[in-house]
Every structure is written in structure tokens, then in C-alpha cells.
Amino acid sequence: MAGHLLPSGLDSPHMSGIDHYTIIMSGLFLDFQGLVMGILGPSQPYLAHRVGVTNKEINLVWTAMTGGSCLATLAVGAVFNVRVTSLI
């Protein structure tokens, strides 16, 4: 169908509504996460100064945030495989 937002193959009649919802929400989350990181990234020197730490120390916050995001992705993927795929 013309005007579809989903890539070819994802508009299959075999996909349920939860699949489309998951794809759209995942994309929106990644957009929002990128927006937050893009806004907060340049503020690192200011945040370090306000908190009273060095730039090197404040960078640990971004490293921890990225590591936490990776762990959360793995955890959500595991939950999705167990809970959501049984609904499909």
C-alpha cells in the first residue's frame, strides 16, 4: 500500500497489531533517547562545573547511562520473547 510507514514485509497480514505497535514505539523511544543525549551531551562541562567534578568524572554518567540502556534492552528483549510472543 502506498504511504505505509513500515518497511516492505512488515505490513504482512500475518503480523498482529502488537507487532506494529512495538515497531512504532521502539522507533519513538530511540528518537527520544537520541534527542535527550543530543541535548545533554554538550552540557557536560556545565554540569561538571555545577556538581564540582571534573569532565572526566562526569563522563562516567554517560557511560553508565549507555551501559544501563544496553542492559535494559537485553532484559526487555527477554521479557518480550517470553511474554509477548506467547500472545501472538
Image (cartoon, grey):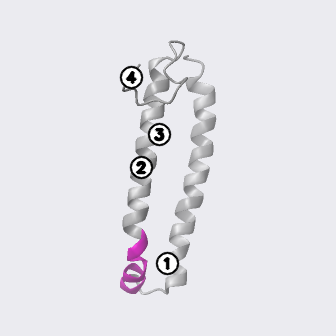
Question: Which mark, residue 58?
Answer: 1
Q: In the rendered view of the protein, which quadrant contains the N terminus?
A: top left
* Whole-number angstrom distance, CA of label 1 to CA of label 2: 24 Å
What's the residue type where badge 3 is placed?
Answer: Ser
* Residue range highlighted in magenta: 41-50
Question: Which mark, residue 2?
Answer: 4
* Whole-number angstrom distance, CA of label 4 to CA of label 3: 23 Å
Label 2 CA crowd tier, 10 Å (few <14, some 14–19, many 20+): few
Q: Is residue 75 above or below residue 6?
A: below
Q: Which residue is mark 3?
A: 26
Residue 60, image x, y percentages: 55, 73
Callout 1 touching callout 4 (CB < 8 Å): no
Identify which residue is drawn at 39% across, 68% down.
40
Dot placed on the residue nearer the N-terminal end, 1 or 2: 2
| Dot in front, 4 or 3 | 4
Q: Which residue is mark 2?
A: 31
Dot placed on the residue nearer the N-terminal end, 2 or 4: 4
| Dot in front, 2 or 4 | 4
